[in-house]
Image: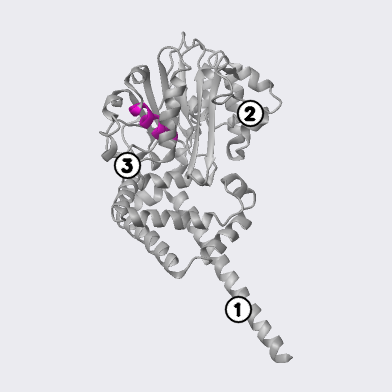
Amino acid sequence: MSDNILDYLEKFGDKTFERLPFGEVDALILSQFAYLKFDGLVPGPGESDSFITLKSIKKNTDFDRLFTDTRYEKVNRKLFALMVSGKRFGGLSLAHYVNIVDTKRDIQFSAVTYKLPGGTGFVAFRGTDENVVGWKEDFNLSIMDRIPGEKEAVGYLKTASGLLSGDFYVGGHSKGGLLSVYASSLVPDPIKKRIMNVYSFDGPAVREEFREKIGYGSIRDRIIKCVPQSSLVGMLFETDDIYSVVKSSGKGVGQHDPYTWVVKDIDLDHLKSLKKSAVIISSALRDWLSKIDMEDRARFIDIVFGVADACDSNDLVSMGVAPVKSMRQMIDGYEGMDDKEKEFLRTVINAFIRDTGVQAKSEARAEWSEFVEGVDKWIESVQGRIEEKQIRKKSTKRNKKIQSEGV
């Protein structure tokens, strides 16, 4: 079985940064740690500039609140336990926690600032969490010059840097990686000069047409970007060659999970190149996007998330607790659309399937079989429930007609 970040902490968690210098695995750990729910446990802007230690968080009566994302509760609990019990991260302290979820602004943004034992700082941006609005914000990357989270990230980094003395790191996983690169590119030069490295772990790239505008070149040589061998998210809009490929024990889109990334001794296990399947899928996605203008992209996003808005729940955890109810509500949302919206949605999705089918050879489908089969099963389930609902409606109408004729 391959080692991951938890195994790394078990082996090296008692080595101080003086004995084992800070590296990319440490940055990945801190990026994953940013997904924990620090609400009410770590002070936010205006509350206090004091840093709270991990040990004090562990003693807090609301400690269990950290792990409310039940999808990763078990591994996140182990991550915390290993960090707080070792010399390497046991003295870690946190401050300036921000967590914004606003459906009106289409934003899910969260960040936290760490002080490592010894005083070195690390500003961590959270990636997309369980809130549906965060996924919509990700989709908006394809249509907006700047998503709301990018604006928040710049302001956050400016403020957080003032809480830290000396040089510091910036990093994040998924959207958090994108925000790290974007914000580091745009902060004033005095702050930018203090940034040692910017870590992006499978984060989408800043779109090429905006790189000159945001000063990407001034930070490029300090960007450390890692993607798994079947990366999809991290290859979005990627046209630069600065990324390195990391081995993952997961399959298909499951490789996006940092807990699947393989650690070899004290470093991530790097590979020479992406899987051919990832190249094919990424190319198909780029071709598909290139054929859809901005207006139609925006329309597609609004329609897709309009269906999701039909659910009582607005996060993936709640949807997972009651999946049948959530699916029925989404089906109701789809059926409530007018015929033009339904036809537009089908046309766009079918175009993606067609383009992918042309490029996706047997190797790509084999590598992504788990994902493809999951999508197929979901589509079959949705279609089955729609047909079942239509049959019930016809049956009800027939029974009413029989009853009325009998009377």
**Residue 237: mark:** 3
| Main secondary-structure element of the magenta-colored stretch | helix
**Residue at the spot of label 1:** 394
Q: Residue 266 vs residue 327: left or right?
A: left
Q: What amino acid is labelled 1 in the image? A: Lys
Residue 357 drawn above or below residue 279: below
Within the image, what quadrant is residue 387 found in?
bottom right
Image x and y of residue 131, in percent: 54, 43
Question: What range of the chain is rendered magenta?
Answer: 176-186
The residue that appears at 60% across and 78% down in the rendered structure is: 394
- Sequence-earlier tag: 3 or 2: 2
Q: CA distance from mark 3 to mark 2?
A: 36 Å
Frontmost of labels 2 and 1 is 2
Residue 48 is marked as: none
| Mark 1 to mark 3 CA distance (whole Å) | 47 Å
Amino acid at pointer 2: Gly
Residue 19: where, in percent of width, then height? 46, 9
Q: Please tell me how crowded label 3 is: few (under 14), some (14-19), or many (20+) other residues with Cα within 10 Å.
A: some
Helix, strand or loop at mark 1:
helix
Which residue corresponds to the image point at 40% horizontal and 50% vertical from the top-left? 366
Q: Is residue 386 magenta?
A: no
**Disc 1 and disc 3 in contact, CB within 8 angstroms:** no
Can the viewer see residue 122?
A: yes
User: Residue lying furthest right in this view?
Assistant: 407
- N-terminal of the two: label 1 or label 3? 3
Q: Nearer the viewer, residue 187 or 7?
A: 187
Name the residue carrying label 2.
40
